[in-house]
Image (spheres, grey):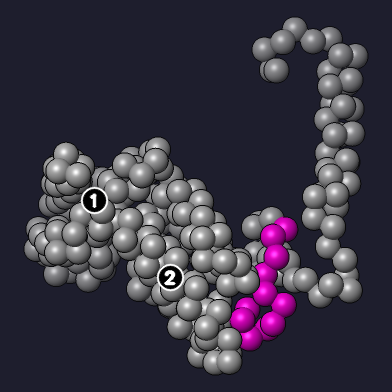
């Protein structure tokens, strides 16, 4: 639009139309999401103002368990903090709270929603391994907070198992562990402790892309090979691990 030869009056018309459009967005949101105050539906904006308007659990115990689960997963993968900072942590928390609401649905629906989120995150540099671990922790945290609802929370762990099974269709657990160990040995103890399970993340990015998450590999690789951030040994290990994982996954696909 900036290249259009518009006059002052025409620009004013465009600006006015844009303002009118945005002024109507709230009406559209209300039509799509007719949440009533008496429904006691809590929105994710109370956790992360940038996350939109999707609901989170109404039970504060579930909300607290979700935040705890997000923080535990955050601590297990320092990659999160190094790459996404505090803003990323807020999104991790709001995502966990949304995931906690899925237990009300049938298993197939939960898995479908989880896979949708997994594809979205994978394209942004977060392999589905992170989501799988998050779901496992979340299921345990929710069950500990509200034991009487444990059967419902088991459904969340089944979604994690579904992601695991999907990954094993491309790389066996033994292959994934071998790739991870090889990466750790190549970069040395200092870097492997600083960024644990990086080899697994790299291999899982390969699988995510094979499963349809376009750009999943490059979104992770581009950050991992930044010479201002990592030494040459690290960068070499990243490229080697991606190559090995891709080769092994292609062999598995050919055998299948």
Whether residue 183 is visible to the viewer of this picture, yes or no, is no
Residue shown at the point (52%, 79%) measured from the top left: 153
x and y percentages locating residue 168 in the rendered image:
25, 58
Bounds of the magenta segment: 53-64
Residue shown at the point (84%, 22%) measured from the top left: 14
Relative placement, left or right, of 256 versus 19 is left
Residue 201 vs residue 2, the one in the foreground? 201
Q: Name the residue under label 1.
A: 170
Sequence-first disc among 2 and 1: 2
Relative placement, left or right, of 19 versus 201 is right
Locate residue 147: give its quadrant. Answer: bottom right
Relative placement, left or right, of 216 versus 49 is left
x and y percentages locating residue 188 in the rendered image:
11, 64
Q: What is the CA distance from the residue labelled 2 to the residue labelled 1?
A: 19 Å
Residue shown at the point (43%, 70%) measured from the top left: 158
Q: Is mark 2 on a helix, strand or loop?
A: helix
Q: In the rendered view, would you say 147 is above or below 191? A: below
Residue shown at the point (83%, 62%) measured from the top left: 35
Q: In the rendered view, would you say 254 is above or below 146? A: above
x and y percentages locating residue 216 in the rendered image:
37, 44
Whether residue 237 is visible to the viewer of this picture, yes or no, is yes
Q: Name the residue under label 2.
A: 158
Is the C terminus in the top left, top right, bottom left or bottom right quadrant?
top left
- 59 part of magenta stretch: yes
Residue reaching furthest top? 5
Locate residue 23: give its quadrant. Answer: top right
Q: Which mark is residue 197?
A: none
Relative placement, left or right, of 113 versus 162 is right
């Amino acid at each position: 639009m900036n290249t259009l030869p518009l006059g002052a009056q025409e620009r004013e018309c465009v600006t006015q139309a844009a303002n009118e459009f945005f002024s109507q967005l709230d009406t559209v949101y209300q039509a799509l999401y007719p949440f009533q105050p008496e429904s006691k539906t809590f929105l994710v904006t109370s956790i992360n103002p940038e996350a939109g308007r999707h609901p989170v659990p109404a039970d504060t115990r579930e909300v607290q368990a979700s935040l705890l689960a997000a923080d535990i997963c955050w601590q297990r993968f320092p990659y999160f903090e190094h790459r996404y900072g505090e803003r990323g942590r807020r999104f991790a928390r709001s995502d966990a709270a949304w995931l906690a609401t899925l237990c009300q649905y049938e298993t197939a629906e939960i898995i479908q929603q989880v896979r949708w989120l997994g594809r979205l995150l994978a394209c942004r540099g977060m392999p589905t391994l992170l989501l799988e671990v998050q779901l496992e922790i979340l299921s345990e945290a929710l069950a500990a907070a509200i034991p009487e609802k444990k059967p419902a929370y088991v459904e969340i762990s089944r979604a994690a198992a579904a992601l695991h099974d999907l990954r094993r269709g491309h790389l066996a657990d033994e292959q994934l562990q071998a790739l991870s160990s090889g990466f750790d040995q190549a970069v040395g103890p200092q870097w492997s402790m600083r960024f644990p399970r990086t080899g697994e993340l790299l291999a899982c990015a390969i699988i995510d892309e094979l499963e349809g998450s376009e750009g999943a590999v490059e979104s992770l690789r581009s950050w991992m090979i930044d010479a201002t951030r990592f030494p040459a040994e690290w960068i070499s290990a990243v490229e080697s691990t991606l190559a090995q994982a891709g080769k092994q996954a292609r062999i598995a696909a050919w055998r299948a």
